[in-house]
Amino acid sequence: MSEKASSYRSISQEQARQMMEQPGVFVLDVREQDEYDSGHIPGAVLFPLGTINRESAERKIPDKNTAVLVYCRSGNRSRSAAHRLAQFGYERVYEFGGINTWPYEVE
């Protein structure tokens, strides 16, 4: 496996917002259900960090070339999740921190 295939990129929240406007971008919220229910980025799919393994990732995101944006509450879990997804062979993983500093719409 090449170095590129096993890495992810950290991007700014502004860059993430711009990417979300493109079709086919998958936004993952890796917090727990109660956190997600209390407010999340519109269109985000709940995928708690503790449930992310190779099989669950392949069910949730079958195409490993899909652009995947990952966030959590403060940025710690999103970095772990992004690293894990990259290890599983996802090629376009972007981590953008936590919802506590997200300046845009939440629902």
Image (tube, helix red, strand yellow):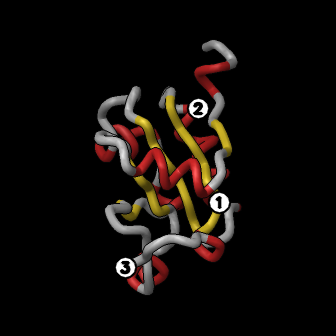
Mark 1 lies on a secondary structure that is strand
Circle 3: is it few (<14), some (14-19), or many (20+) Cα within 10 Å?
Answer: few
Circle 1: is it few (<14), some (14-19), or many (20+) Cα within 10 Å?
Answer: many
Circle 2: is it few (<14), some (14-19), or many (20+) Cα within 10 Å?
Answer: some
In this rendering, the answer to whether 35 lies above or below 98 is below
Q: CA distance from mark 1 to mark 2?
A: 19 Å
Q: CA distance from mark 3 to mark 1?
A: 18 Å
Residue at image location 57% in from the left, 48% down from the top: 15
User: At label 2, which amino acid type do we have?
Assistant: Gln
* Disc marking residue 87: 2
Residue at image location 65% in from the left, 46% down from the top: 11
How many badges with numbers are in the image? 3
Q: What x and y, as percent, mark residue 100?
A: 63, 76
Q: What x and y, as percent, mark residue 104?
A: 50, 71
Q: What x and y, as percent, mark residue 79?
A: 66, 51
Could you tell me if the residues under marks 2 and 3 are in contact, i.e. CB atoms within 8 Å?
no
Q: CA distance from mark 2 to mark 3?
A: 31 Å
Quadrant of the drawing holding the C terminus: bottom left
| Left or right relative to 88: residue 61 | left
User: At label 3, which amino acid type do we have?
Assistant: Glu
Q: Nearer the viewer, residue 68 or 35?
A: 68
Residue at image location 48% in from the left, 49% down from the top: 18
- First in residue order: circle 3 vs circle 1: 1
Mark 3 lies on a secondary structure that is loop
Residue designated by label 3? 107
Residue designated by label 1? 97
Quadrant of the drawing holding the N terminus: top right
Mark 2 lies on a secondary structure that is helix
Comparing labels 1 and 2, the label whose residue is closer to the camera? 1
Q: Nearer the viewer, residue 71 or 101?
A: 101
Q: Nearer the viewer, residue 15 or 57?
A: 15
Residue at image location 63% in from the left, 26% down from the top: 6
